C-alpha cells in the first residue's frame, strides 16, 4: 500500500520531472554497464557491414549524378537542366572528387590503427608499490607539520584500492569503462569515491580544510602575529598555513580551488590491460568492439569498420576532407541546377534528384562538422577519448563555480577561473599531458610535414604510436604541477 504522502508528491510536476530524469539516467547507466561488461568483440561481419553500406551509398550517388544528372545534359535530352558543355564540366569535376573520396576511404579502411599486442609481449600485472618515493617526502613534510593527534592522508596504495580511480585515466581503461561513472559533483572533493582527484602537491589545501578547527595549534608568523584579541581571519589562516606547509602563497578563495587529477597515469601498473595481459603504451586504450588495445585510441568508427588510432588517424582526416568537398559539390550543383530548371524551363524535377540532394546535404553536414572537430582536437594535441575527459574536468569546474557564485556574479567567476589558470595553467593546452607546445606541432605530428599529405592519403604520421613525449609541466608520474614548479622557460 503506497504512502498517501508519497502519492501526493508523485503527482506534482517537479516530482514527475525528477522521475523522468531518473529513468533516463538509469537507462544511460545500464547501457554503459552493458557495454563495459561485454567480454567478446563484435563479429567481423558486423564490424564490416557499414563499409558495404557506405560503398553502396557512394555508388548510388555516382549513378544518379552521372547516369541521370550529367548524362541528360550531355545527350541534350528534353529533361536536361543545362547544355552539353556544362554537363561535361560537371562530370569531369565530379569524377576527380569521386576518385579522391574512394582513394581516401579505401586507405583508411585497409590501414589498421596499430595494435599493442603486435609490438609488446604478454606479462603479469605489475605489483602496486606501497608508496612512491616521490610522494613519501611530501607526505612526511605534511605529517611533520600536522597538529598533534591529526591523522595523515591515506597512502597511495590505499587510494589505488578504490576502483573508480581508473575513470580519470588518460592512458588506462577502455573508453566504455571510462564513461561508466559520472565524476563527483562535490566541489570540495570530500567524497570517498573521488579520493584521487587531489594531486600530492595540493595536499596543503586538504590540510587547510581539515585543520581549520585545530588552527590554534599552528604557531603564527612572527612578523604578522595577531594579538590575542584580534580575530583570526580566513586570509591570515591561509597565509600561516602556506608558511607552515612551505607552499608558495597564491591568492585564492578558500571555498573553491582547482583540483587536477592525481591519478599516476604514467605508471606501468596503471596502464596494465588485464584482457590483453600487457602494459599499454601511452595513450593506448582497449576497444571492446575490436577486442584489443589500440595505439593512441581515438574512437571506434563503424563507417570504416575499425578503430581510428595512431596509424590511420591521418587517413581518416584525409577521408573527411575528401568526403566533405565531394558532398558539398554534389549538394550545391544538384540543388542549383534543379531550382534553375524548375523555375526557368518548367521542367519536372526527377525524384532521384531530390533523394540525391538530401543524401548529399546529410553527409556534407556530418563530415564537415566531424572534420572541424578533429582539426581542433589535433591542434590541441588531444584524441576524442581524451577530449571527453577534458570536458568532464571543465564541467566539474563549472559546477563548482556555479555553486560558489550566484548566476549574476559573472565577473567573480571569470576572476576565479583566471586565478586558477594563473596557478595551474590553461587546462585545454598547458594542462594537457600530451600537448606539444603549439598547434602546428600537433598538426604535423598527426598529418606529417608534407603539404600534399595534409589533403591526399599519402605519407604517414610522424609518430608510431608506441611512445609520446610528455608535457614538461607534468611530473614523472603524469600529475600536473603548479606553474611555480614548471621549468623556468615555461612559466
Image: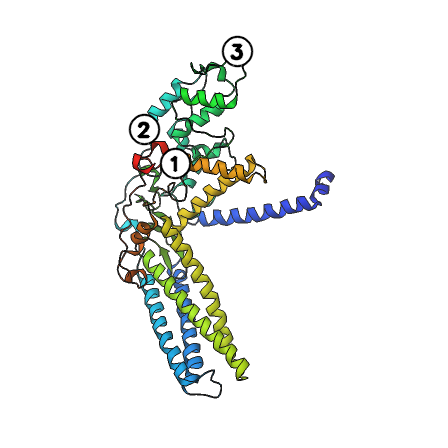
Q: Residues within 10 Å of mark 1 (few under 14, many from 20)?
A: many
Q: Which mark is residue 228?
A: 3
Position of residue 411 measured from the top left corner of the image (x, y, whole percent): 53, 39
Along the polypeptide, which appears first: circle 2 or circle 3? Answer: 2
Is residue 307 shown above or below 182?
below
Give the SS element for disc 3.
loop
Q: Which residue is mark 2?
A: 134
Tag nearer the camera, 2 or 3 = 3
Judge left or right: residue 404 versus residue 65: right
Give the residue displayed 40% in from the left and 38% down from the top: 425
Along the polypeptide, which appears first: circle 2 or circle 1? Answer: 2
Q: Nearer the viewer, residue 188 or 416?
A: 416
Give how far apart the Cα atoms at labels 2 and 3 are.
40 Å
Q: Confirm whether residue 114 shows in the render.
A: no
Q: Which mark is residue 263?
A: 1
Q: Confirm whether residue 13 shows in the render.
A: yes
Give the residue displayed 36% in from the left and 21% down from the top: 140
Amino acid at each position: 500500500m503506497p504512502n498517501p504522502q508519497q502519492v501526493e508528491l508523485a503527482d506534482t510536476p517537479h516530482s514527475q520531472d525528477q522521475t523522468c530524469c531518473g529513468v533516463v539516467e538509469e537507462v544511460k547507466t545500464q547501457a554503459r554497464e552493458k557495454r563495459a561488461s561485454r567480454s567478446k568483440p563484435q563479429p567481423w561481419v558486423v564490424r564490416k557491414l557499414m563499409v558495404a553500406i557506405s560503398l553502396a551509398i557512394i555508388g548510388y550517388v555516382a549513378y544518379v549524378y552521372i547516369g541521370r544528372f550529367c548524362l541528360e545534359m550531355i545527350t541534350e535530352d528534353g529533361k536536361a537542366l543545362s547544355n552539353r558543355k556544362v554537363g561535361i564540366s560537371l562530370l569531369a569535376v565530379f569524377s576527380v572528387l569521386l576518385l579522391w573520396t574512394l582513394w581516401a576511404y579505401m586507405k583508411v579502411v585497409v590501414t589498421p590503427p596499430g595494435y599493442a599486442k603486435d609490438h609488446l609481449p604478454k606479462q603479469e600485472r605489475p605489483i602496486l608499490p606501497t608508496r612512491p618515493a616521490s610522494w613519501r617526502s611530501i607526505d612526511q613534510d605534511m605529517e611533520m607539520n600536522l597538529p598533534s593527534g591529526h591523522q595523515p592522508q591515506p597512502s597511495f596504495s590505499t587510494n589505488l584500492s578504490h576502483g573508480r580511480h581508473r575513470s580519470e585515466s588518460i592512458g588506462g581503461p577502455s573508453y566504455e569503462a571510462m564513461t561508466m561513472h559520472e565524476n563527483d559533483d562535490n566541489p570540495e572533493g570530500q567524497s570517498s569515491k573521488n579520493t584521487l582527484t587531489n594531486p600530492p602537491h595540493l595536499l596543503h589545501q586538504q590540510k587547510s580544510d581539515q585543520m581549520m578547527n585545530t588552527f590554534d595549534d599552528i604557531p603564527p608568523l612572527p612578523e604578522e602575529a595577531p594579538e590575542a584579541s584580534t580575530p583570526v581571519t580566513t586570509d591570515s589562516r591561509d597565509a600561516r598555513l602556506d608558511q607552515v606547509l612551505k607552499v608558495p602563497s597564491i591568492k585564492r578563495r578558500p571555498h573553491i580551488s582547482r583540483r587536477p587529477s592525481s591519478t599516476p597515469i604514467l605508471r606501468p601498473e596503471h596502464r596494465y590491460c588485464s584482457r590483453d595481459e600487457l602494459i599499454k603504451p601511452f595513450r593506448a586504450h582497449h576497444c571492446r568492439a575490436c577486442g584489443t588495445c589500440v595505439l593512441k585510441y581515438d574512437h571506434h568508427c563503424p563507417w570504416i569498420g575499425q578503430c581510428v588510432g595512431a596509424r590511420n588517424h591521418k587517413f581518416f582526416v584525409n577521408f573527411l576532407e575528401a568526403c566533405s568537398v565531394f558532398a558539398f559539390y554534389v549538394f550545391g550543383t544538384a540543388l542549383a541546377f534543379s531550382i534553375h530548371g524548375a523555375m526557368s524551363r518548367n521542367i519536372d524535377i526527377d525524384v532521384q534528384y531530390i533523394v540525391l540532394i538530401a543524401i548529399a546535404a546529410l553527409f556534407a553536414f556530418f563530415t564537415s562538422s566531424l572534420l572541424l572537430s578533429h582539426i581542433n582536437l589535433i591542434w590541441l594535441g588531444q584524441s576524442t577519448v581524451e577530449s571527453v575527459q577534458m570536458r568532464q574536468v571543465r564541467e566539474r569546474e563549472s559546477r563548482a563555480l556555479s555553486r560558489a557564485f550566484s548566476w549574476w556574479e559573472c565577473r567573480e567567476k571569470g576572476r576565479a577561473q583566471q586565478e586558477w589558470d594563473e596557478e595551474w595553467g590553461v587546462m585545454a593546452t598547458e594542462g594537457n599531458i600530451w600537448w606539444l607546445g603549439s598547434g602546428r606541432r600537433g598538426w604535423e605530428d598527426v598529418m606529417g610535414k608534407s603539404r600534399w599529405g595534409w589533403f591526399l592519403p599519402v605519407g604517414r604520421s610522424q609518430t608510431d604510436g608506441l611512445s609520446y613525449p610528455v608535457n614538461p609541466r607534468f611530473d614523472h608520474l603524469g600529475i600536473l604541477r603548479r606553474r611555480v614548479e614548471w621549468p623556468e622557460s615555461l612559466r
